[in-house]
Amino acid sequence: MTTPSSGETGYLLDNAQPEAGTRFDALGALFDASTFRHIGELGIAPGWRCWEVGAGGSSVVSWLADRVGPAGRVLATDIDTSWASGAAGGVVEVRRHDVGRDAPPEGGFDLVHARLVLVHVTDRDRALRSMAEALRPGGWLLLEDADPASQPLICLDEYGPEQELANRLRRGFRSLLAARGADLAYGRRLPRLLREAGLADVTADAYFPVTSPACAVLEAATVRQVRERLVAAGLATDEEIDGHLENVASGRLDLATSPMISAWGRRV
């Protein structure tokens, strides 16, 4: 097998692909409850001004809008707003914005949140600074990102050839991510990076499902989305991918996710 070229750039899981919507729904099913718990514990209230960075789908944006009410504001940004645009209206503004390149929006936010965003951003340090600078004094930055390097398996219990194939394809997928500049150990750095950005009361936890119907939906959509690149890089054959998708559909695989590390801090 060969390794992918390190010269590739851009987001591997392009929002323009038809599988993107399926992935957003599955990620929401897996992680929305944890995200909403964190934001709720930070004290979100009517009138808050929130910036949802890398909004992707609309589930978090819509939840925030319900919590801040008519006196609040929710700004949802992404480099591709096609999937979040349906949430626009009322207190929600959807805007195209590249957090790693563009200046932060004005406004002094009570909450800035990003989930599964910075791991893919080339200039992660600048993006994090931009989000911290957008906070009002006392405002909270909540970052949630994966740490695939700390738990690289999609099948924790690798007891047979189906599980071995799943883990091998997952290694191939992660090598494609790394070749495009993704930091597969980024999640663990979040607490330190929030402190270095000058935030106070920094706290973090981690969560990852070990098996769930949504894990199977997410895996099938992800593999279909990167199928051509896996084959082109010599990381898998079409026959192996077809077999893996059949295994996923059968329900015999206990599919896990990478740990989602959530870290939050307050601007003083």
Image: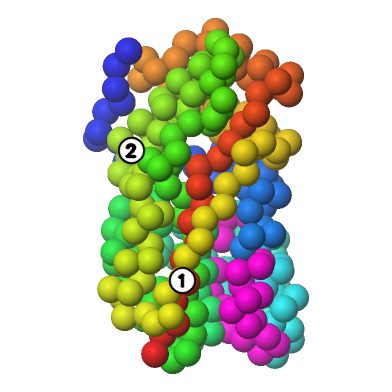
Q: Is residue 258 magenta?
A: no
Query: Dot 1, how many residues are within 10 Å of its Cα: few (below 14), some (14-19), or many (20+)?
Result: some
- Residue 1, quarter of picture: top left
Task: Report the colour scheme.
Answer: rainbow
Q: Which residue is mark 2?
A: 178
Query: Dot 2, how many residues are within 10 Å of its Cα: few (below 14), some (14-19), or many (20+)?
Result: some
Q: Say if residue 105 shows up in the picture.
A: no
- Does residue 263 appear to the left or right of 242 in the view shown? left
Q: Position of residue 250 (x, y in %)?
A: 74, 19
Q: Is residue 40 magenta?
A: yes
| Residue at image point 56% right, 40% down | 257
Q: Position of residue 191 (x, y in %)?
A: 38, 66
Q: Which residue is mark 1?
A: 203
Q: Earlier in the sequence, mark 1 or mark 2?
A: 2
Magenta-colored span: 36-58
Which amino acid is tagged 1? Thr
Which amino acid is tagged 2? Ala
Q: Nearer the viewer, residue 239 or 171?
A: 171
| Residue at image point 43% right, 80% down | 201
> Tag 2's secondary structure?
helix
Q: Nearer the viewer, residue 243 or 13?
A: 243
Q: Nearer the viewer, residue 207 or 40?
A: 207
| Residue at image point 50% right, 47% down | 259
